[in-house]
Amino acid sequence: MSKEHRHANRLVNEKSPYLLQHAYNPVDWFPWGDEAFEKAKQEDKPIFLSVGYSTCHWCHVLAHESFEDEEVASYLNDHYIAIKVDREERPDIDSVYMKVCQMMTGQGGWPLSIFMTPDKVPFYAGTYFPRNSKYGMPGFMDVITQLYEKYKQDPDRIAEVTKSVTDALAKTVSAKSDHRLTKDITDKAFEQLEKRFDSTYGGFGSAPKFPTPQNLLYLVRYYHFTGNTAALEMAESTLQAMARGGIYDHVGFGFARYSTDEKWLVPHFEKMLYDNALLLMAYTECYQITGNPHYKEISEQIITFVMREMFSSEGGFYSAIDADSEGVEGKYYVWDYDEIFNILGEEYGDLYTSVYGMTLEGNFEGKNIPNLLSTDMEEIAEDHGLTLTELHQKLDVARKQLLSAREERVHPHVDDKILTSWNAMMIAALAKAGKVFEKPEYTRTAETSIHFIEQHLIQDNRVMARYRDGEVKYNGYLDDYAFLLWAYEELYEATFSLPYLKQARYLTEEMIDLFWDNEQGGFFFNGYDSEELLSREKEVYDGALPSGNGVAAVMLGKIGYLTGETAYLDKLDGMYYSFYDDIGQVPVAGIHFIQSLLLMENPTKEVVILGAAGSFTSELQQLFLPDVTLLASNDSEQLAEIAPFTSEYKQLDGEVTIYVCENFACHQPTTDTAKAWEYIRNRR
């Protein structure tokens, strides 16, 4: 039935692509808000809260099986108040109720299904339920009927469960320890990564296997500070394996969200902005360290993909691309064997299928996912009488033809909302890539995007979370502030434009004012000016992306060293007490937070360059030096306003002058770049 002939529910007035996907369900959905909760209280109905996101495969399945079903909808409408939440717009709501689901069931995921009282306290939680009982799971219809009966007939039991939930949530609030996290935790984190490392296929753990770029960002830093080559080898083998696997789109570029198998062959075909941002950063840094051109190639291909499919004409980046098209997961991305020959012809078809592991039988449900997992390029080049260069040239011609043919297919849904936090990660990654690869166009794109955020997503000095279709909504969360700090810091490192550093310092102050826990230390997820929820979360464990406290910790260290503001370093030091109990046992769970310990517990250097340094600074920018903070300016007065510790620094004889300091204690200034290099390279 077409939308014109169906009744729209309240979600039709929302901007979230996920909520709009459900605007014509027969379920009488409410968006999260007072209207829903007041109605639930007035009618004494339980609340069914459904949390998901627009590119979530199992969310689509649940919607199709149950939310589009007239019988299910009729029961929900008569007996419940049904609320839909987009987890990407309201990660604060998702965080609280996901924690409850994990406490109640031992697992979590999306779609998240919560049954709660009108006071927003859950009494039952789950994820996906099939329409009818199967896979050993209760059917959704059975669940909603039985829970409603229990809610009405056994209020004492419901009260008992909700009290235990609120008590359990209260216990999850971490108190500041008397003990402090120390340098040995950085070694413990490495050892835990080493134990989880898959030495056969790369990556960590078993299937499903996620890219977890924060692990790779940690490993390359651990290698830098300790010289432990095993750390670099783990990072490199993972980056190389992923780039060979089907998790990487060899036709259109970019990475899918995760691999369903341990070999990285079969992806969950959804593509997320944040994965591609953080992987761009990881490949770029690996190139900095090794100089291996393969990492540069993958980095530039990620940028090509993102600019083609995820960059808006307004200057922001879209959130995600669905796994499904025409209701089938991966349909857009997979190939029939014969189809390749029809498009490419015999010669190129034979070459392409032999390189990318494509057969008549296929490697995924009778179809083919292009991959390089078993490919020996030199052997194939020899078999076809080609040099490696000629082989790569022919493959690129074939790839472009296949991409052109693929673009004729029905494209997966693009979630085109623009999230501050995810955009900030892409800005940081582009700025880094622009600097390392000396590609000013990448840096310009990062600047275009930060200007978009400044114009649209900062209102009355308050960072906001989401922009779509002209609407800005939701007070920004800790992630929005911490990741935006990351973007400004990387933009400063790429351009040495002091306004970026000034804005970073201002944002740091705002982040502390809005989110800092004055009693126990650390940052809350929600600002003091945000909606009060069942509990106030303070996350330090990483999920698919680094935790807000993890990124905030690293940024406090970086901005502290860049500006010389020791109050930021003191705050960071306090966090080592706040999160001692959370991180102490399983540091790998908060690996991004541990990254800050590498910075704080090892010797660091501050390099200040006064004057137009040119080649010296660009040479420094090419290197991977996480222990070196670099300030450069032609305007020593303006620099001193932002970084007061430089106020006594002067140019010598009008020449470019370099100050190299260790923990703010400085060597004699020099105009001799060779001498400066000696100071910088000298590792204690």
Image (cartoon, grey):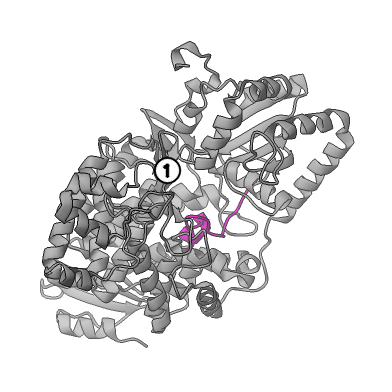
Q: Is residue 548 magenta?
A: yes
The vertical placement of 71 against 526, above or below, is above
Q: Residue 309's x, y, as percent?
A: 29, 42
Q: Residue 402's x, y, as percent?
A: 22, 46
Using the rendered view, name the quadrant where residue 227 is placed.
bottom left
Left or right position of 519 against 276? right
Label 1: few (<14), some (14–19) or many (≥20) C-alpha neighbours in 10 Å:
many
Instruction: Identify the residue at the far top of this view.
Output: 5
Near-viewer residue (672 or 134): 134
Residue at point 65%, 39% (across, down): 129
The vertical placement of 606 against 56, above or below, is below
Task: Please tell me whether mark 1 sits on a helix, a strand or a loop.
Answer: loop
Residue at point 21%, 57% (across, down): 350
Q: How many marks?
A: 1
Using the rendered view, name the quadrant where residue 389 is placed.
bottom left
Could you tell me what secondary structure mostly forms the magenta stretch? loop
Q: Tell me, yes or no, if residue 505 can be seen here.
A: no
Q: Tell me, yes or no, if residue 64 can be seen here.
A: yes
Using the rendered view, name the quadrant where residue 159 is placed.
top right
Near-viewer residue (563 or 153): 153
The vertical placement of 25 against 294, above or below, is above
- Residue for badge 1: 323
The vertical placement of 251 against 215, above or below, is above
Q: Which residues are magenta?
A: 537-553
Near-viewer residue (256 or 481): 256
Q: Is residue 540 magenta?
A: yes
Residue at point 36%, 61% (across, down): 245
Amino acid carrying mark 1 in the image: Ala
Left or right position of 276 against 532? left
Left or right position of 614 against 103? left
Q: Residue 629's x, y, as percent?
A: 32, 70
Q: Residue 570's x, y, as percent?
A: 51, 67
